[in-house]
Amino acid sequence: MKIPMRWLILMLGWTVMTVSAHEMRPAYLEIKEVEQHRFEVLWKRPQVTGRSLKLDLRFPDHCTAEQLGLDQVTDSAWISRLMLDCSTEGLSGHSVTVEGLSGTMTDILVRMRWQNGRNFNHILKPDQPGVTIARDSPSGLAEYLRLGIEHLLTGFDHVLFVIGLLFLGRSTWELVRIVTSFTVAHSVTLGLSALDVVRLSQTPVEVVIALSILFLAVELAKGDRSSILFRQPWLIAFIFGLLHGFGFAGALRDIGLPSDAMLWALLLFNIGVEIGQLMVVFAGLSLVFLLRTQPAELPRWLTRVPVWGIGAISAYWLIGRTTLMVAS
């Protein structure tokens, strides 16, 4: 069954409009029991356009929260520290909710650390903004796999770059080389950054990521086959992949890695990113296949619309992120 061309054009337009949003990082809530019924709370909320997301913690009525010092502001998050006193009832069996979560695209990783060494892990989602705290739970490592997938699919700048790379593959083998180069490169810097071997400020990284997408779009629009982009596309994918790895690491640093299973969590997050990337590649190639099976040949200008869209969106990101960096 062939899809009418007008529907394909509408789908493309809807995709370009959707991609204009910025990626959404996860939030992180850690509750650590320091003595019976008393807890230290670490609360990290994503920073969007210089402001913290409006997310408010709600503890049980018998608990009293006292803020410890002023909020700490990083280039990607707002961080609060609280002391929670839950009188004689404690937290086990009681609910913790986050008001305002339902109006966002953000997930929240909740990590409860008990004095006896047991941990409780849970993911809050916009449609499930509350959780009943338990004494124990599975390791929660599988959540890092899901977070990796979601981070790639909601990290629209990374999605656009991967889509741009698809235009460089003139054969299946060349496309495999390009995607593999990008994968190896961002896996290296993701690991180095997540383990604090190399650390870069997130704001300039995001500026240069937007610049990399704009560079790719401009070169694709020019179509100069003698340029290094077309002669050595795998090399360009590798170089920019190193940069995008630092972008992936930003979300992972926000939620942290469990000290008792750091390498496993890092591996699962990276595998999740790769799964998300393969989903984008498959969707992009499927769309190309559908376009090629249309009975009427596409006008030349229409084939350039995706590249122009990538260029326009990346230029918008570049201006906005540069302005934010200069103003901060």
Image (cartoon, rainbow, N blue to C red):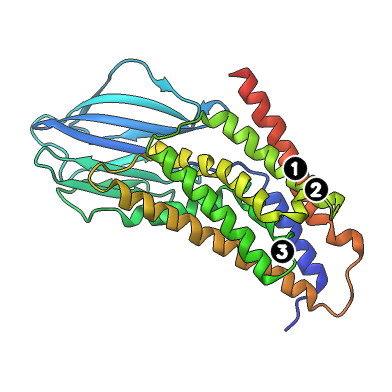
Between the residue at mark 2 and the residue at mark 3, the CA separation in whole angstroms equals: 14 Å
For the C terminus, which image quadrant? top right
Whether residue 282 is situated above or below residue 313 in the rendered picture: below
How many C-alpha atoms fall within 10 Å of the one at disc 1: few (<14), some, or many (≥20)?
A: some
How many C-alpha atoms fall within 10 Å of the one at disc 2: few (<14), some, or many (≥20)?
A: some
Task: Please name whichever residue, 243 or 97, is drawn nearer the observer in this view of the structure.
Answer: 243
Task: Please name whichever residue, 187 or 259, is drawn nearer the observer in this view of the structure.
Answer: 187
- Tag 1: amino acid: Phe
Task: Please name whichever residue, 63 or 124, is drawn nearer the observer in this view of the structure.
Answer: 124
Place of residue 142 in the rendered image (x, y in percent of width and height, measured from the top left): 33, 57
Left/right placement of residue 205 relative to residue 236 reads left
Identify which residue is drawn at 62% across, 62% down.
177
Q: Which residue is mark 2?
A: 219
For the N terminus, which image quadrant? bottom right
Place of residue 199 in the rendered image (x, y in percent of width and height, measured from the top left): 46, 31
Place of residue 311 in the rendered image (x, y in percent of width and height, measured from the top left): 77, 45
Place of residue 157 in the rendered image (x, y in percent of width and height, measured from the top left): 63, 46
Q: Which residue is mark 3?
A: 169
